[in-house]
Image: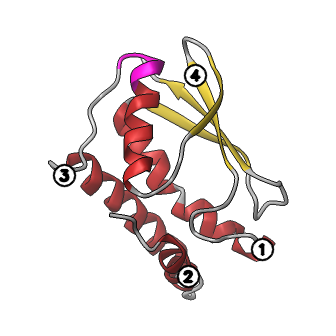
Amino acid sequence: MKLPLKQIGKLNYMIYNLPGIGEKLLRGQSRAAAYAAFYAPFLGGKKCGSVKELIAGWKSFLNKSGIELVVTAEDKKSFIFEVGACPYGYVKKEECGACDAAMDLDRTYLRLLGGKMEILETIPGGASKCKFRVILQA
């Protein structure tokens, strides 16, 4: 089932812009979605013990959302992946905050898998693609 991610992105942007509570609300919603997905029997993830397992677990999760994982570098402790177009449709500088808050879903899911995600570049931040490093946590 492919999720309507661009529509979710628009909704997330509206939530993010609610005065006073928007960012906290979107971050909380994103984290809750990650926990729900990780522990759901049909989506669920499992703790990974190696970078190979981490890539496989992350790839499985993203593929269920219709997102292709492109790994550009890998070693025993980490991997780098890129996304050529924002799944949520974020491209404007003013969408940076909503982008970062929505990425709490990714950060949380990867943490549950056993990794820590660092954002290196984003499209709304001015890059031509989004680029991330994921570090295996011992």
- The residue tagged 2 is 10
Magenta stretch: give its range: 49-53
Spatial separation of the CA atoms under disc 4 and disc 2: 32 Å
Is 68 placed left or right of 118 in the picture? left
Q: SS of the residue at dot 1?
A: loop
Contact? badges 2 and 3 (CB < 8 Å): no
Q: SS of the residue at dot 4?
A: strand
Spatial separation of the CA atoms under disc 4 and disc 3: 26 Å
Q: Amino acid at mark 2?
A: Lys
Q: Amino acid at mark 4?
A: Ser
For label 4, count other residues whose C-alpha is less than 10 Å away and answer few (under 14), some (14-19) or many (20+): many
Looking at this view, is 18 or 102 the one in front?
102
- The residue tagged 3 is 40
Is residue 110 highlighted in magenta? no
Q: Residue at x 25, y 49 (%)?
A: 43
Spatial separation of the CA atoms under disc 1 and disc 2: 12 Å
Spatial separation of the CA atoms under disc 1 and disc 4: 29 Å
Is 34 placed left or right of 77 in the picture? left
**Number of numbered markers:** 4
Query: What label sits on residue 92 in the rendered view?
Result: 1
Position of residue 42 relative to residue 52, above or below, is below
Contact? badges 1 and 4 (CB < 8 Å): no
Q: Amino acid at mark 3?
A: Ala
Query: What label sits on residue 78 in the rendered view?
Result: 4
Q: Residue at x 53, y 47 (%)?
A: 68
Sequence-wise, the earlier of marks 1 and 2 is: 2
Q: Residue at x 37, y 53 (%)?
A: 64
Sequence-wise, the earlier of marks 1 and 4 is: 4
Q: Amino acid at mark 1?
A: Lys
Contact? badges 4 and 3 (CB < 8 Å): no
